[in-house]
Every structure is written in structure tokens, then in C-alpha cells.
Image (spheres, rainbow, N blue to C red):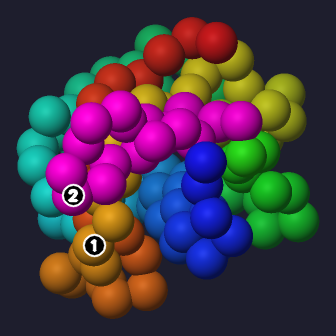
């Protein structure tokens, strides 16, 4: 089970990821990642194919608790997280970012956890 303080860190990290996608700061997103599984070009291709404008809506929580789970047997602790995206045209999109978060602060931004973006999925 995810503790409240851990969940706050997970939420902050997910919001930062959505903010960077929604403001088209994909190169910055790439720099913040602990790994480079999904590069900015892949995001741009998916965004172009989807034909919608991704946005960051600060008035909405991006991550219900059921979208984050502890990865069994991980040491240090890792979380598998599915992050819903928002578009200007439709609100909540059918696209989600699948990421792995690490229970360690991000080297470039101490306010968020370390993370790797694994994929973009249609939910």
C-alpha cells in the first residue's frame, strides 16, 4: 500500500510530467527522466497522430490513487504509474503515459521523484 507522503511525491511528479507535455516542453521532460526509454520525437509523433492539443489543467487532479501501484519485489521501491492526459478539444484524453517512478528525488528537480516514461497508451 502506498503511504500518504509517498503518494504526495507521486502526485507531484505526475503533475510535472503532465505540465511539461501540456506545455510542449518535451526536451525538458527528456532531461528530467532517469532513463531515455521514450524520446521527445516519439511524443511528438504520437501527439501529431492523435490530432489533439495536449494541455495542463491545474484545476484537475491528474492521478487517482488506483493509477499508482508498488512494483512487487522492487528495491529500491518503484511505482508503476498510468497518468491520464488532457486535451483542449476533449478534456480527459484516451491517451495515458505509463511511467516508472523511483522512491528517490530527481537529480534535476528535487521537488519530484526520479522517473522513466515507459510508453504512451490508449486507455
Q: Residues within 10 Å of mark 1 (few under 14, many from 20)?
A: some
Residue 53 seen in the figure: no
Where is residue 80? Give x, y as percent: 43, 37
Q: Secondary structure at mark 1?
A: strand
Which of the labelled discs sits on residue 104, or is there none? 1
Residue at 61% of width from left, 48% of height from top?
A: 1
User: What residue appears at the point 68 percent right and 57 percent down from the top-left corner?
Assistant: 56
Residue 11 or residue 75, whichever sits in front: 75
The residue under the point 31% across, 54% down is: 77
Percent of width and height locating residue 45: 32, 23
Q: Secondary structure at mark 2?
A: loop
Left or right, residue 13 beside residue 67? left
Q: CA distance from mark 2 to mark 1?
A: 8 Å
Q: Are the residues flagged by discs 2 and 1 in contact, CB closer than 8 Å? A: yes
80 is within the stretch colored magenta:
yes
Q: Tell me the magenta residue range.
A: 66-82
Mark 2: few/some/many CA within 10 Å (<14, 14-19, 20+): few
Amino acid at each position: 500500500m502506498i503511504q500518504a507522503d509517498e503518494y504526495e511525491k507521486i502526485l507531484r511528479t505526475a503533475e510535472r510530467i503532465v505540465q511539461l507535455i501540456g506545455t510542449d516542453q518535451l526536451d525538458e521532460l527528456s532531461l528530467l527522466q532517469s532513463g531515455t526509454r521514450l524520446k521527445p520525437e516519439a511524443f511528438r509523433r504520437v501527439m501529431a497522430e492523435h490530432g489533439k492539443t495536449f494541455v495542463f489543467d491545474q484545476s484537475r487532479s491528474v492521478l487517482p490513487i488506483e493509477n499508482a501501484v508498488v512494483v512487487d519485489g522492487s528495491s529500491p521501491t518503484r511505482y508503476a504509474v498510468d497518468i491520464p492526459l488532457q486535451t483542449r478539444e476533449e478534456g480527459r484524453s484516451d491517451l495515458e503515459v505509463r511511467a516508472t517512478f523511483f522512491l528517490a528525488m530527481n537529480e534535476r528537480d528535487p521537488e519530484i521523484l526520479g522517473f522513466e516514461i515507459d510508453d504512451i497508451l490508449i486507455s
